[in-house]
Amino acid sequence: MKIIARAPSRVDPAGGGTDSPPYCLDYGGAVVNFTVARYSYVSFEWRPQERGVLIYSHDLKRGVQAASSKLLEFDGHLDFLKAFVKRLVGPERGCLVVTQSDIPLRTGLGGSGAMGVALVGAISRALGAAMTKDDIAVLANDIERKDLGHSGGNQDSFGSAIGGAKLITYHKGGGCGCQRLRVPESVLAQLERDSLLIYTGESHLSGSIHADIKKGYHQENSPTIKAMDGLKAAAQRMAAALSAGDLAGYVDCLNASRVNHYSLHPSCDSDRLRQFFAALAPCIDGGKTCGAGGGGFIFVHAKSNRRKQCAEIAEALGGRVWNFNFDHQGLITWGETPTCEEEIESLIRVCR
């Protein structure tokens, strides 16, 4: 049987960045994380050992073959997908892995985290391994950080594995807990009605931004630590506001997060981001950059009955506008009919 995994993306309206070491280890952190109904998909199925490993990305229209997972090499060619297959699939087994995603690369919505969670979800089910969603999030993040050496924290993985609105709390010295927020249904509905995700047309490189932030963190009298403290406090206040149904408090924390995020390091900001927020100011109550910043998506809360105008202004600037909808399930997996040999052969031809 072919196993399919679907994992959603996320936005981080408050606290993003405080999930990353060294700050979360030295001071603890807090992130409010919303799971978004935009998805990464992974199809996984076993093949005879002699057929080896075949990996294909529909988004990149590229594939790779190897006699076994052990022989997959990190060479800049689908390295992200290779890392998960190398860690999770034994060298004595053959498999077919096919991926596709709704989430543009390097845009601040945690696309790599969603793909990692989907990969772990599909492969662990195929292996018959009993894993909780928390376990899957931790393992997916571990592969991305250790095997691939990517900078960052784990809120992307938790945001993808576990649905809804969450507060992720990071403990000084290590460890974290993910708590679903009990937000009134009317508030969830208003958030979906008045929130928009707007792609500014610029990608960002979160790894380099995280490296810049770490450099600032270690400077004497670092403004980065003060900004991190502000981000953490905003997340804690936002979680309380959402649970109490206080949308005005939520918006205040959203704006505080944007201000503190820009203060982390100049690379978190850009002229393009400032252009969008300046143009949208008359029709939004608040907003912030998604993810590490420098480009990508912004997340805004429109004024009452101004959502359409907000979208029109963003599109006039060349932005791409998405409606915002919560995903309340997080990762899901299911079984389907195996891929036919004709389709597999067509994928193999692409790899040659």
Image: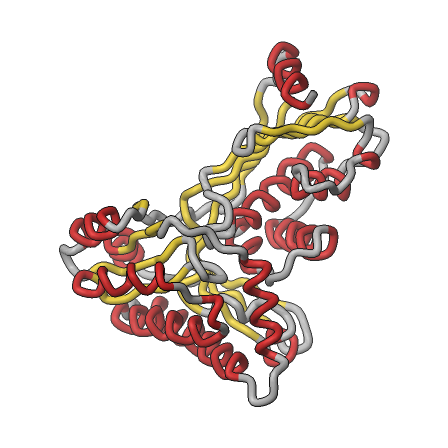
Please state the horizontal and vertical placement of residue 176, each as a whole percent of the image.
61, 67
Nearest the viewer among 60 and 196 is 60
Residue at the farthest top position: 342
User: At 69% from the left edge and 55% from the top edge, which residue is drawn?
Assistant: 142
Judged left or right of residue 23, residue 314 is left
Q: Quadrant of residue 216?
A: bottom right
Please state the horizontal and vertical placement of residue 270, each as a whole percent of the image.
40, 64
User: At 51% from the left edge and 39% from the top edge, which residue is drawn?
Assistant: 40
User: At 57% from the left edge and 22% from the top edge, which residue is drawn?
Assistant: 336
Quarter of the picture holding the N terminus = top right
Judged left or right of residue 13, residue 338 is right
Quarter of the picture holding the C terminus = top right
Q: Quadrant of residue 274?
A: bottom left
Please indicate, yes or no, whether residue 163 appears anywhere in the rendered image: no
* In the depicted structure, whether residue 113 falls above or below residue 52: below
Please state the horizontal and vertical placement of residue 62, each as a whole percent of the image.
61, 29
Nearest the viewer among 204 and 17 is 204
Residue at the farthest front position: 271
